[in-house]
Image (spheres, helix red, strand yellow):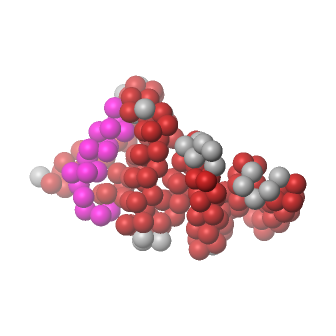
Amino acid sequence: MLDEAGKVYQRTLQGYEKELGSGHTSTLDTVNNLGNLYVDQGRLDEAKKMYQHVLQEREKAPRPEHISTFDTANSLGNLYVDQGQLDEAERIYLRALQVYEKALGREQVNTYIPALNTTENFTVLYKQMGRVNEAEDLYSRALYGLEAVLGRPSKRCQDIITALAVLHGDRG
């Protein structure tokens, strides 16, 4: 099934490139989706090339702060983590959060779910890197935003509260 999906994405991509050009949003969305498919198939090097290409093209666009740019940056950051390229993951997550803040403003970014997803991914990275204080700061930031959007009883908030307790236990 994944192979058939890959063929469909490839045909769609060829059509979009021919009709709309390589930098068109629909073309880039298809390249991004192909990257997601490659991740699902375990073809991480190919996925990385797709995400990097999309990110470069989207950053050239008149509105590089478009939400789809952040989604691609988040996916690329996750891929870097999976490949053990933690410094690259940190760079890309940091860049995504900075662009989110520029596009949305500090207060709105703290309650915007895609930005909070990146923040949570960033916390996991810092935890892996042994940077517990920075992980704690980002967990607290994510918790604040998720409480505002989902409410403290939500599973995501409770998962962060548990993660914070574990971080505190790791230090104590």
Viewer-side residue, 23 vs 128: 23
Residue 86 image position (x, y, % from top left):
38, 66
Residue 87 image position (x, y, % from top left):
37, 66
At x 72% / y 55%, what residue is drawn?
A: 23
Residue 40 image position (x, y, % from top left):
64, 63
Viewer-side residue, 34 vs 16: 16
Viewer-side residue, 169 vs 22: 22
Look at the picture and state if 71 lies above or below 81: above
At x 54% / y 47%, what residue is drawn?
A: 70
At x 34% / y 32%, what residue is drawn?
A: 144
Residue 69 image position (x, y, % from top left):
58, 49
Look at the picture and state if 109 lies above or below 1: above
**Is 86 included in the stretch rendered in magenta?**
no
Q: Quarter holding the N terminus?
A: bottom right
Residue 55's quadrant in the figure? bottom right
The magenta-colored residue range is: 128-144
**Is 131 included in the stretch rendered in magenta?**
yes
Main SS, magenta residues: helix
> Visible in this render: residue 144?
yes
